[in-house]
Amino acid sequence: MKLQINLDDFRVTKGKDFRIKKAKTKVKSLYRDNAHYEELIAQFRSEIDELQQKMYAQDRHGMLLIFQAMDAAGKDSTIKHVMSGVNTEGVESHAFKRPTSGELDHDFLWRHIIASPPRGRLGIFNRSYYEEVLVCKIHPDIVTKIQRLPHETTADLKRLFKDRLQDIANYEAYSHRNGIHIAKFFLHVSNEEQKKRFLARIDTPSKNWKFEEGDVKERAHWDEYMTAYQDTIRATATPECPWYVIPADDKKNMRLIVSAAVLAEMKKLRLTWPKLPQDQLAVLAHARQLLMSEP
């Protein structure tokens, strides 16, 4: 049985109406048990894969999926579970870390623009240019001391971050007009659940490698991050380039909702297998005739 999910509960298209305090971190379970979950996620993978193959063949549309979250929300595992069934030939994935010295010689969007998917491809950003209005806003020393910006640009940080949000909105609108459709996902984990997952990373040897002391220190800025996410979503959510605020306390639920959202965004493109012109159809007919005439 196909899972019905009301994505209006999670989709944000009119940013000014968004209030992060009203966004849920947990909703009623969408699956009965693990077997049911595996069945549902497999159905989504199959449909996403079919549409991606049509996107690749048609070569007129591309799509970029951006994943943002607080640490331990489950970005890596969500990307893995949702996209594992999609043909890798048509998927490009980038995980953005701290900018290199060479990247800092460019504008803040540069390294993301050159990594954006071409038509026919499905691109995935694990973190993105949104870090420039999230982490950098919480830690402005990154902007004033590391990014080597002109002094007149950093003199008014409030204006700088407002301008960056506008630059992002303009870039996403530009991408949409040129056939690269962007959907953004904020995996919204609660403060309490993040604490549990950090403790699990500390107490479980196989998860120790995931833990960084800095992650705990960032928890002290939780309220600031929530405000920054709210400001970001309010400034950049549009009908063409929506945000999906996904409850992340239950990872399986989160993956199912993300899968449904990705599928819904792809369906908007009305992807079809390309129709060949008559001269190419004639070539196919001739090739078929030759094959059938072989002994």
Image: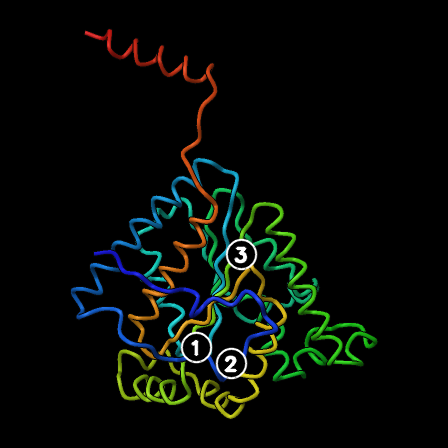
According to the picture, the residue beneath numbered tag 1 turns out to be: 188
Q: How crowded is mark 3: few (under 14 residues within 10 Å), some or many (20 or more)?
A: many
Tell me the kind of residue under disc 3.
Answer: Ile
Mark number displayed over residue 275: none
Which residue: 45% across, 17% down? Answer: 280
Q: In which quarter of the image is residue 137?
A: bottom right
Of 114 and 270, nearer the camera is: 270
Tell us which disc is closer to us: 2 or 3: 2
Q: Nearer the viewer, mark 2 or mark 1?
A: 2
Query: From the viewer's perspective, is residue 207 above or below residue 263?
Result: below
Instruction: From the top left corner, tell me how far across and down residue 19 is, in percent.
Output: 54, 80
Residue 9 position in % (x across, y down): 42, 70
Q: Mark 2 points at which residue?
A: 20
Indicate the secondary structure of the residue bearing disc 2.
Answer: helix
Mark 3 sits on what residue? 182
Instruction: State the residue at coordinates (65%, 64%).
Output: 168
Evaluate if marks 2 and 1 touch, with contact meaning CB atoms under 8 Å apart.
yes
Q: Which amino acid does label 1 sit on?
A: His
